[in-house]
Image (spheres, rainbow, N blue to C red):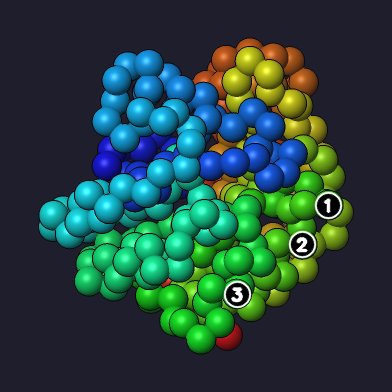
Amino acid sequence: MAESNIEWTEHTWNPVTGCTKLSPGCKHCYAETMSHRLRAMGAAGYEGGFKLALHPERLQQPVLRKKPTTYFVNSMSDLFHEEVPDKYIEQVLDVCRVTPHHTYQVLTKRGSRLESFFEGRNCPSNVWLGVSVEDKKYGVPRIAHLRQVKAAVRFLSVEPLLEDVGKLNLKDIHWVIVGGESGPRARIMKPEWADNVRLQALSQGVAFFFKQWGAFGADGVRRGKKLNGRELNGRRWDDFPLRVVSA
């Protein structure tokens, strides 16, 4: 476990590492780059680089932490990857259940498996479930899968935002995060794409969080991520969702 530099969480917990590319949002995966770097450094758990691996020895890590925190689960993988057994996902969720003082954020690009997994299963009340929405073809359809799962918070990570995603149905979605891509091969995010999502979130009563511009600023100029700031349409958007369960 480690403290996180991700603006919308506090710590990361990785009982699974590694993944495989699924859609355009995966093209320049930060976790893949980081995995190879960690392997070169000899870090435990990354001997296989970005090859998917289960780490049962990490399952009890949140239990040992008594101070409440928010965990982003599997920042270096996807809990609902097809090679992660259902029984292992259940073990992860069991840890969440026995640590109700923590909040867990689970994000996936595998929306169909997310929906099918929770058919006949309950999501712990301290687990927030989210899907990535990078474009119209691959990302937007994931929202319908997410909506079918009863969870305390359902959220969208619209990052990296690669195009105008058009009209969004945000019914039963509690939180929307938007961000551009960072890194040396980053693709540009246009301000009007981000603002389109913002306006729809606000009009539909959904909490909105603008995470970053990424490598390109609002003016389309490449510079350091921090230099681009986090303002969208003249202000910072750091809203978090209310903790409610809806059908």
Q: Nearer the viewer, mark 3 or mark 1?
A: 3
Where residue 107 sits: x, y (%)? 52, 55
The quadrant in which the C terminus is found is bottom right
Residue 24 visible at all: yes
Image quadrant assignment for residue 186: top right
Q: Nearer the viewer, mark 2 or mark 3?
A: 3
- Per the image, the residue denoted by label 2 is 141
Around disc 2, counting alpha carbons within 10 Å, would you say few (fewer than 14), some (14 to 19), or many (20 or more)? some
- Per the image, the residue denoted by label 1 is 137
Q: Earlier in the sequence, mark 3 or mark 1?
A: 3
206 vs 1, nearest the viewer: 1
Q: Earlier in the sequence, mark 2 or mark 3?
A: 3
Q: CA distance from mark 2 to mark 3?
A: 15 Å
Q: Amino acid at mark 3?
A: Ser
The quadrant in which the N terminus is found is top left
Q: Are marks 1 and 2 in contact (CB under 8 Å)?
A: yes
- Give the left or right position of residue 140, taking residue 214 as reference: right
203 vs 60, nearest the viewer: 60
Q: CA distance from mark 1 to mark 2?
A: 7 Å
Q: Amino acid at mark 1?
A: Lys
Q: Amino acid at mark 2?
A: Pro
- Compared with 47, 195 (above or below) is below
Label 2 sits on a secondary structure element that is: helix
Residue 191 visible at all: no
- Give the left or right position of residue 194, taking residue 68 as reference: right
Where residue 202 sits: x, y (%)? 68, 61
- Per the image, the residue denoted by label 3 is 116
Label 3 sits on a secondary structure element that is: helix
Around disc 3, counting alpha carbons within 10 Å, would you say few (fewer than 14), some (14 to 19), or many (20 or more)? few
